[in-house]
Image: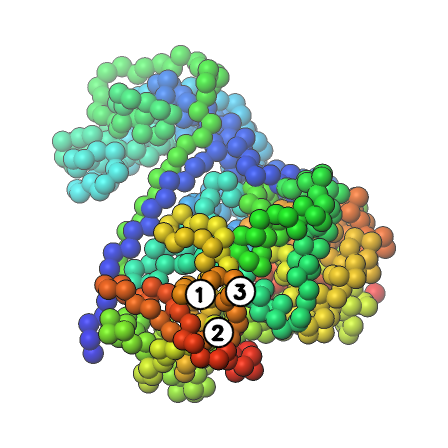
């Protein structure tokens, strides 16, 4: 039996900000879901199942928030699933929803991810005072910065690359009304002059903490035929995981990430991602992860990713635009960040990305990772159904 | 086998919550000794109120005052109240359907004993003396034989509404690091670092976890590693962490102890921070009474060749 093609017919985001004190968590997710339904011209009754994701429960301290959010998401009397894969959760949540449609289990599925970081404490939630263990010595960026130094050593990349990425993503965010950071007076000099927090990571090269939610409506061919706007079609989707720490782990280019990308490309019939893919929304929480993931995802050979960044290839008007929306560097409601990547990829191939639209984008990659490079989830979406 | 370590782990945090319009009205109402419900599309009144209709999923905002008197719909006796519960003496957890409501609210019912509680009994709110806009503004319920009290018809609009609360969360665990890490910690007390080797891939894990994460087999073969090692990568920390009493800047490094197949993390001292480099050879510096080395300092050996540690970053 062949798989049912999966279409994205509705996308909704909240305006991501530092703190949404005017809404409860229910009110926040509701806003994104409502916008996705409106985009698809559907009502709650048209939804067959709800698949929701967020970062660990400890972040906001609400255990199993999906129970309390069922009313807000119209899930009463329907199947509701929660997905939980750390920072990659927004991506894997969308893939679980997509698989329900692809398998013919449900016709139309609402999928949503959120985080209210202002009412959460991610740093605390991730570094509990475990007895007998040595306390973490370095704070959030201290986990990532040594891996970035390892990449710089391995690739010979010049020190300016991280700042170039941050400067690009923050400028892209100015064209995205939903992005959290809108730094109108951003300059490369300002990025370079920002304090070095965890050398080699500067303040301006780190992601913000955001409150936000992102929702998508996924449906089958019949649903897509009724959609008022062009759908995005899933051409391939995959998840991979590996242990957080093991002997031989390559933090610069994790095997699970490479395998995940290869699986997506195989499903989509992509043999040369650099040439056949028109743009990518990649989970880049610290600027240097752009060149690192460009290599991991097969857009560049090992040690060559930074050259694409340096040459302007990843700029909005470049040959392979990356993080047209401004990316995680401009917006980071942790649990939702992966789904925003997936949704922004879909917006591009639907031609609905507004000012940050890449002209003629036909195939765009959405990517998420998390748990200290433990979980990866990706999808490739296109403007036409698979095998057409 | 030596005794496995155990210790209490307390996880505690004061979470903040933005209430949104409905919970804001409900909790502000309690502060003013007014209990509010919300009317659903099919005309039922839900107490406590919710923001979205459980049947139609529509937004609901029609606030309705209900009476502070009601009926117990079911209950369970709590013999031994715990810290933070509404009463310090034994009480009933009761579901109370307030007069005018269609659903029941969970709260404590103060009664002399389980024989004094029954389903169908009449109760009323006992208000807390100090009220802040929280569910604890209802101190508890108490038995009530009087007449039904009619609500005043409050609309739910208040001066100076409560818009957020702090919800303190606390979890109490007993933590055990298990057999392998207990052995590792015991060895540290003798200033020795002991890992375990995987019988399948031969990799040496420090600290050991009792199983190899790639092969999925138990590790038991103990291997002493170090004490010297190589800085494989690092960062320079320039911001002071809240919970740490370390002067910045300092170097936070990945250190592959000689004989280990993945790096530990540690602080580098005894050398200016801007002279630390990948490949630097280091050794632990212990302080009296500490479980872990305080930091690592240069040994003075020549730097390790990149090829010898490039798999150990
Ligand atoms: Zn092994």
The quarter in which the N terminus of chain A is drawn is: bottom right
> Looking at the image, which residue is at 35% across and 39% down?
B168
Residue A308: quarter of image: bottom right
Rendered image: mark on residue A159: none
Location of mark 2 (residue): B280
Along the line of sight, the residue nearer the viewer: B275 or A267: B275
Question: Which x, y percent locates residue B244?
Answer: 37, 52
Q: Is residue B50 left or right of residue A185?
A: left
Q: Are marks 2 and 1 on the same chain?
A: yes
Along the line of sight, the residue nearer the viewer: A160 or B259: A160
Q: Earlier in the sequence, mark 2 or mark 1?
A: 1
Question: Which x, y percent locates residue A123?
Answer: 45, 51
> Looking at the image, which residue is at 39% across and 78% down?
B228
Q: Is residue B101 left or right of residue A281?
A: left
The quarter in which the C terminus of chain A is drawn is: bottom right
Rendered image: mark on residue A146: 3
Q: Are marks 2 and 1 in contact (CB under 8 Å)?
A: yes
Does residue B117 appear in this view? yes
- The mark lying in front, picked from 2 and 3, is 2
């Amino acid at each position: 039996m062949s798989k049912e093609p999966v279409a994205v017919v509705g996308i909704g985001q909240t305006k991501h900000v530092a703190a949404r004190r005017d809404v409860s968590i229910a009110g926040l997710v509701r806003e994104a879901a409502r916008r996705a339904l409106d985009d698809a011209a559907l009502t709650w009754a048209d939804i067959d199942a709800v698949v929701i994701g967020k970062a660990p429960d400890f972040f906001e301290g609400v255990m199993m928030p999906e129970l309390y959010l069922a009313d807000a998401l119209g899930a009463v009397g329907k199947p509701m699933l929660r997905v939980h894969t750390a920072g990659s959760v927004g991506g894997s949540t969308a893939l679980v929803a997509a698989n329900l449609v692809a398998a013919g289990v449900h016709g139309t599925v609402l999928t949503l991810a959120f985080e209210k970081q202002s009412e959460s404490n991610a740093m605390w939630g991730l570094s509990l005072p475990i007895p007998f263990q040595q306390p973490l010595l370095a704070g959030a960026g201290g986990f990532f910065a040594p891996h970035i130094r390892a990449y710089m050593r391995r690739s010979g990349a010049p020190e300016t690359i991280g700042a170039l990425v941050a400067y690009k993503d923050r400028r892209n965010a100015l064209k995205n009304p939903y992005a959290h950071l809108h730094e109108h007076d951003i300059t490369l000099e300002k990025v370079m002059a920002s304090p070095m927090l965890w050398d080699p990571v500067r303040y301006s090269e780190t992601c913000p903490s955001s409150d936000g939610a992102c929702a998508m409506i996924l449906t089958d061919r019949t649903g897509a035929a009724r959609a008022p706007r062009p759908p995005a079609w899933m051409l391939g989707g995959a998840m991979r995981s590996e242990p957080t720490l093991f002997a031989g782990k390559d933090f610069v280019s994790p095997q699970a990430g490479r395998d995940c990308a290869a699986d997506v490309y195989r499903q989509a019939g992509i043999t040369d991602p650099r040439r056949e893919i028109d743009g990518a929304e990649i989970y880049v929480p610290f600027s240097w992860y752009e060149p690192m993931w460009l290599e991991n995802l097969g857009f560049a050979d090992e040690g060559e990713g930074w050259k694409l960044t340096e040459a302007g290839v990843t700029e909005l008007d470049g040959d392979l635009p990356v993080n047209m929306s401004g990316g995680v560097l401009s917006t980071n409601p942790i649990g939702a960040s992966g789904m925003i990547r997936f949704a922004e990829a879909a917006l591009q191939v639907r031609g609905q990305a507004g000012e940050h639209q890449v002209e003629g984008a036909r195939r765009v990659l959405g990517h998420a990772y998390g748990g200290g490079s433990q979980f990866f989830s990706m999808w490739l979406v296109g403007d036409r159904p698979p095998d057409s | 086998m030596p005794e496995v370590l155990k210790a209490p782990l307390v996880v505690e945090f004061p979470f903040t919550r933005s209430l949104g319009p409905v919970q804001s009205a409900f909790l502000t109402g309690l502060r003013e000794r007014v209990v509010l419900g919300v009317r659903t599309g099919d005309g039922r009144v839900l107490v406590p109120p919710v923001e979205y209709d459980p049947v139609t999923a529509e937004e609901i905002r029609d606030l309705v005052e209900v009476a502070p008197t009601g009926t117990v719909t079911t209950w369970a006796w709590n013999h031994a109240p715990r810290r933070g519960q509404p009463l310090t003496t034994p009480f009933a957890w009761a579901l109370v359907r307030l007069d005018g409501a269609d659903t029941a609210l969970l709260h404590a019912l103060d009664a002399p004993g389980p024989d004094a509680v029954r389903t169908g009994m009449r109760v009323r709110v006992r208000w807390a003396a100090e009220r802040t806009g929280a569910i604890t503004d209802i101190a508890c319920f108490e038995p009530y034989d009087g007449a039904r009290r009619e609500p005043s018809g409050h609309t739910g609009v208040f001066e100076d509404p409560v818009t957020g609360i702090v919800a303190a969360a606390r979890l109490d665990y007993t933590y055990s690091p298990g057999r392998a890490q207990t052995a590792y910690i015991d060895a540290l007390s003798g200033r020795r670092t002991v890992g375990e080797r995987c019988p399948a891939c031969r990799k040496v894990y420090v600290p050991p976890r009792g199983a190899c994460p790639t092969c999925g087999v138990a590790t038991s073969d103990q291997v002493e590693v170090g004490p010297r090692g190589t800085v494989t990568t690092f960062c320079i920390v320039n911001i002071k962490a809240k919970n740490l009493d370390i002067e910045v800047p300092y170097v936070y490094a990945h250190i592959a102890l000689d004989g280990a197949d993945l790096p530990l993390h540690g602080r580098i001292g005894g050398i200016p921070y801007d002279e630390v480099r990948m490949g630097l050879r280091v050794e632990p510096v212990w302080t009296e009474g500490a479980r872990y080395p305080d930091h690592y300092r240069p040994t003075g050996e020549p730097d390790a060749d990149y090829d010898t540690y490039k798999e150990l970053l």
